[in-house]
């Protein structure tokens, strides 16, 4: 079945399937009858009147102190609620309050024992903070939080506090009489000061009036100087302005002349540009066209010359190859002929050599007579004992021919007449 609780109490469900027990603060829970148990604990704020009678202070003076503390079991903190349930489950609010009261009273008495009467009486806030701090650190382990603590009353049975009051009262009365005397003295002094200030004020007033008159005269003179200066400056400014105006007019004229000159320069530049374009159209362009034509003609001529040179070179190469081939063929034929001649020379030896010499004799005779055939005129002188005329010339040639065998024998070592006889 369901159980509910308000925000000022907590429910603890234990038993079957509840280990550890379930704690709920301000809510509802389902409890199985017979196998589960539900318990409640109050979360209300408790007001405690903490009294400590005849507690000896640090100087041995017995005093009685009464404090008011507000405290409650903290239901929002699960650990503190668990600690409170372990300690106070099944106890009434009065029993819980009594336990907390005894704890607070013990801490209050301990703090009183470490302080003097004057410290407790004069600085109640400090005393309350100490009690609150020490008690909170101890009660939190029980699951209780101290909401507030205030020192309500401090008294004693030995008139110690009353004596402190008398001393303080006497001090206050003495201070009051001293203060009254000081006030009367101050009043007389202030009255004398007031009279002195009055006389000083009168003198100062007269001085101020004289000073004001002087300042008036000085300022009037300064104003007059300033006015005259302004008038002179105004006249000078007028003249200066006239001069500036004339100067601006001259400057404007110069600007107009500059603009006109600039426009003239612009027109001249445009005319120069027009003439340049005209010259470019009439002279430069045709010249460039002619130059282009000549360049192309020169290029064509150069290409033609290159082609002709290449053709000539090719012709020379082919002709050279043909001549080389002819020379090679001729050389091969001559080589073959020479080889055959060498074989013949090897076989017939001197006979073959004589045969070759005999074949060459007509050529030798031709070469000997060639100078004579080339002569345009021959003059012959006779000594009278020999032939005259062509016979003489022919005899000279034949004489040379008869000397050839001797010359050949000297050159080759072969005697033609001997070879002919042996043959």
Image: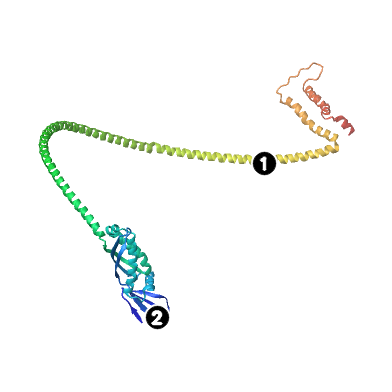
Query: Is 405 positioned to the left or the right of 50 in the image?
Result: right
Mark in front: 1 vs 2: 2
Q: Secondary structure at mark 1?
A: helix
Residue 226: x and y, percent?
Answer: 14, 33
* Quadrant of res 227: top left
Identify the residue under disc 1.
Answer: 322
* Quadrant of res 339: top right
Question: What whole-number distance in Å separates the C-alpha atoms at marks 1 and 2?
Answer: 137 Å
Give above or below for 81 relative to 270.
below
Give above or below for 78 relative to 30.
above
Residue nearest the viewer, comparing 281 with 102: 102
Discs 1, 2 touching: Cβ within 8 Å: no
Identify the residue under disc 2.
Answer: 36
Residue nearest the viewer, comparing 265 with 141: 141
- Numbered badge on residue 339: none
Residue 359: x and y, percent?
Answer: 80, 33
Query: Is 80 positioned to the left or the right of 410 in the image?
Result: left
Which sits earlier in the primary sequence, circle 1 or circle 2?
2
Q: How many marks?
A: 2
Residue 63: x and y, percent?
Answer: 29, 62
Q: Secondary structure at mark 2?
A: strand
* Quadrant of res 9: bottom left
Residue 205: x and y, percent?
Answer: 10, 38
Query: Is 149 positioned to the left or the right of 320 in the image?
Result: left
């Amino acid at each position: 079945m369901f159980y509910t609780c308000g925000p000022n109490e907590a429910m603890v469900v234990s038993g079957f399937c509840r280990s550890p027990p379930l704690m709920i603060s301000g809510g509802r829970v389902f409890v199985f009858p017979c196998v589960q148990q539900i318990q409640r604990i109050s979360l209300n704020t408790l007001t405690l009147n903490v009294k400590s009678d005849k507690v000896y202070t640090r100087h041995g003076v017995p005093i009685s102190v009464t404090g008011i503390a507000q405290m409650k079991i903290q239901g929002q903190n699960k650990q503190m609620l668990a600690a409170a349930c372990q300690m106070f489950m099944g106890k009434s609010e009065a029993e819980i309050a009594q336990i907390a009261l005894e704890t607070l009273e013990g801490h209050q008495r301990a703090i009183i024992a470490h302080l003097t009467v004057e410290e407790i009486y004069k600085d109640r806030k400090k005393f309350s903070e100490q009690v609150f701090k020490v008690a909170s650190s101890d009660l939190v382990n029980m699951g209780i939080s101290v909401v507030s603590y205030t020192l309500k009353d401090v008294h004693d049975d030995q008139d110690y506090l009353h004596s402190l009051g008398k001393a303080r009262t006497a001090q206050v009365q003495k201070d009051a009489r001293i203060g009254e005397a000081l006030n009367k003295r101050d009043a007389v002094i202030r009255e004398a000061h007031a009279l002195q200030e009055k006389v000083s004020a009168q003198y100062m007033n007269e001085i101020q009036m004289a000073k004001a008159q002087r300042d008036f005269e000085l300022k009037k003179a300064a104003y007059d100087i300033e006015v005259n200066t302004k008038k002179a400056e105004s006249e000078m400014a007028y003249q200066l302005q006239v001069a500036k105006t004339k100067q601006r007019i001259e400057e404007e004229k110069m600007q107009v002349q500059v603009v006109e000159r600039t426009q003239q320069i612009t027109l001249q530049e445009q005319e120069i540009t027009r003439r340049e374009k005209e010259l470019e159209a009439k002279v430069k362009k045709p010249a460039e066209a002619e130059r282009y034509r000549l360049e192309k003609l020169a290029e064509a001529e150069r290409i033609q010359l290159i082609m002709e040179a290449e053709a000539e070179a090719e012709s020379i190469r082919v002709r050279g190859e043909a001549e080389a081939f002819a020379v090679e063929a001729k050389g091969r034929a001559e080589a073959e002929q020479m080889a055959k001649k060498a074989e013949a020379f090897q076989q017939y030896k001197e006979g073959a050599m004589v045969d070759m010499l005999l074949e060459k004799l007509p050529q030798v005779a031709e070469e000997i007579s060639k100078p004579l055939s080339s002569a345009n005129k021959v003059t012959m002188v006779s000594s009278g004992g020999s032939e005259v005329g062509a016979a003489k010339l022919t005899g000279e040639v034949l004489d040379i021919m008869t000397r050839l065998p001797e010359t050949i024998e000297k050159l080759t070592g072969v005697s033609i007449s001997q070879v002919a006889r042996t043959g």
